[in-house]
Amino acid sequence: MSGVGKRFGAVQALADIDLRVGAGEVVALVGDNGAGKSTLVKIISGVYQPDAGTIELDGRRVSIGGPRAAQALGIATVFQDLALCDNLDVVANLFLGRERVQGGVVLDEVGMEQEAWRLLRRLSAKIPSVRIPIASLSGGQRQTVAIARSLVGDPGIVLLDEPTAALGVAQTAEVLALVRRLRETGLGVILVSHNMSDVLAVADRIEVLRLGRNAASFDARDVSVEQLVAAITGASDEARAGRTDTPDTPGTPAGGTS
């Protein structure tokens, strides 16, 4: 994505956003509330159309006209609310809206169940049965089903919006392991999260948004939580401005007056 912008009336939600994701790479997207993360996620997933900028996929310029267009381009999104149906079993949730049929009439239950197990094995998922209702699963298992559903259709990019929100320690570890497996299979992963520890545990690169603009970009191996928080809050910019605006004078302590 290059120079992407989005305006809602008088509000400039995004301005000149650049974002690059490679195959087999986990890119974390972080920022404070109002930074523009949700708007950018909805542009990538086809919910919103950008007002400016270009989007390229595999070197080809594309237009993401809607959620179905995003799926057709190989972009899968797992939103924070998961959008699972508690009363349906795992198979039904995985293929909801994309059911497979035999002869154009009868549901291919056997084929969908086999494909469900294939997808779950690909993620090394701990699901006891694909025929139990979603309501019987834990939070981590539900997240697993949502991620497995995103793999239906063999996408190239998976976008995860706050995948560990409201999960316990063990369930969070399970989901982070799933993110690593997605990377190992060669998928590009965009991870949106407020949890800096989770981000540092799985991301290769971290992109910081602030007030609708690119604020910083870090290699996850070379950055600390403190540096991330400073970039997110703008403290690092204020510190640089302070050093520029108040130069030291002879006999004066740095950054102040005697």
Image (cartoon, helix red, strand yellow):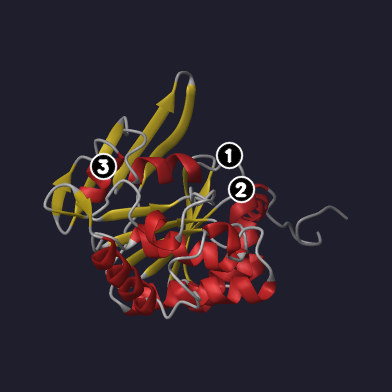
Residue extending farthest to the right is: 258
Tell us which disc is closer to us: 2 or 3. 3
Task: Name the one closer to the observer, 252 or 1.
Answer: 1
**Residue located 53% across and 59% down the image:** 134
**Residue located 54% across and 48% down the image:** 81
Q: Which mark is residue 68?
A: 3
State how far apart marks 2 and 3 are (Cα).
Answer: 29 Å
State how far apart marks 2 and 1 are (Cα).
Answer: 6 Å
Q: Amino acid at mark 1?
A: Gly
Task: Name the one closer to the observer, 255 or 224.
Answer: 224
User: What residue would you read off at disc 2?
Assistant: 32
Circle 2 Cα neighbour tier, 10 Å, few/some/many (<14 / 14–19 / ≥20):
some
Looking at the image, do the residues carrying marks 2 and 1 touch, with CB atoms under 8 Å apart? yes
Residue 111 spot, x, y in % from top left: 24, 66
Q: Which mark is residue 201?
A: none
Image quadrant occupied by the C terminus:
bottom right
Q: Which mark is residue 34?
A: 1
Compared across the picture, whether 241 is left or right of 175 comes to right
Residue 116 spot, x, y in % from top left: 34, 68
Compared across the picture, whether 80 is left or right of 157 comes to right
Q: Amino acid at mark 2?
A: Asp
Q: Amino acid at mark 3?
A: Arg
Residue 254 spot, x, y in % from top left: 76, 61
